Image (cartoon, grey):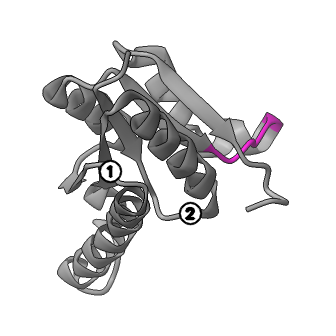
Amino acid sequence: MYDTILVPTDGSAAVVEAVERAVDLAERYDATVHALYVLDSTAYSTLDMSTSVVIDALEDEGETAVGYVAEQAEAAGVPAETAVVHGTPHRTIVDYAEEIGADLIVMGTHGRSGVDRFLLGSVTEKVVRTAPVPVMTVRVTDEES
């Protein structure tokens, strides 16, 4: 049913449960897990400090985040690939899913509603609306994260 499962990660607690679900599905269907961290470097272009310092730190954070996914997959005997890329998060996730031929995207969501969701937006929501493949969302409330 699934050969390639994409797990976008931002390194937050919301991703932990999504990773567990993705690895479980990959183990069940003999699939490969792809961990993706998208660095939105344009969001940091107005900082007073050197942008490269921030980008380097975010790239390190991204490597840690995708490394966690790879470790979880490896522990379950599931093949995993990782990538840290620059771009607009929701667009990059959808493009990457198409590029690798993903059958499923598994994403965590913070479970925000009302004004918080309106002001903060939702990468997951945008991916759900634009992805060419099924998207499994794993909800984590603000209290749980």
Residue that appears at 22% across and 79% down? 56
Q: Nearer the viewer, mark 2 or mark 1?
A: 1
Vertical arrangement, residue 124 with respect to residue 43, above or below: above
Separation of disc 2 and disc 1 at Cα? 14 Å
Tag 2–tag 1 contact (CB < 8 Å)? no
Q: In this picture, which residue range is highlighted in magenta?
A: 109-114
**Which of 79 and 121 lies nearest the eye of the viewer?**
79
Asked whether 12 falls inside the magenta stretch, the response is no
Q: Quadrant of the C terminus?
A: bottom right
Q: Amino acid at mark 1?
A: Ala
Classify 10 Å Cα crowding around label 1: few (below 14), some (14-19), many (20 and above).
Answer: many
**Which type of secondary structure does the marked residue at label 2 adopt?**
loop
Left or right of 104, for residue 32: left
Residue 38, percent across and down?
31, 52
Left or right of 8, for residue 85: left
Q: Amino acid at mark 2?
A: Ser
Vertical arrangement, residue 64 with respect to residue 127, above or below: below
Instruction: Please count the marks in the image.
Output: 2
**Which of 83 and 123 lies nearest the eye of the viewer?**
83
Residue 59 in sight in this render: yes
Q: Which mark is residue 142?
A: none
Residue topped by disc 2: 12
Residue 69, percent across and down?
40, 59
Residue that appears at 51% across and 50% down? 19
Q: Which mark is residue 35?
A: 1
Q: Quadrant of the N terminus?
A: top left
Residue extending farthest to the left is 99
Most prominent secondary structure in the magenta stretch? loop
**Which type of secondary structure does the marked residue at label 1 adopt?**
strand
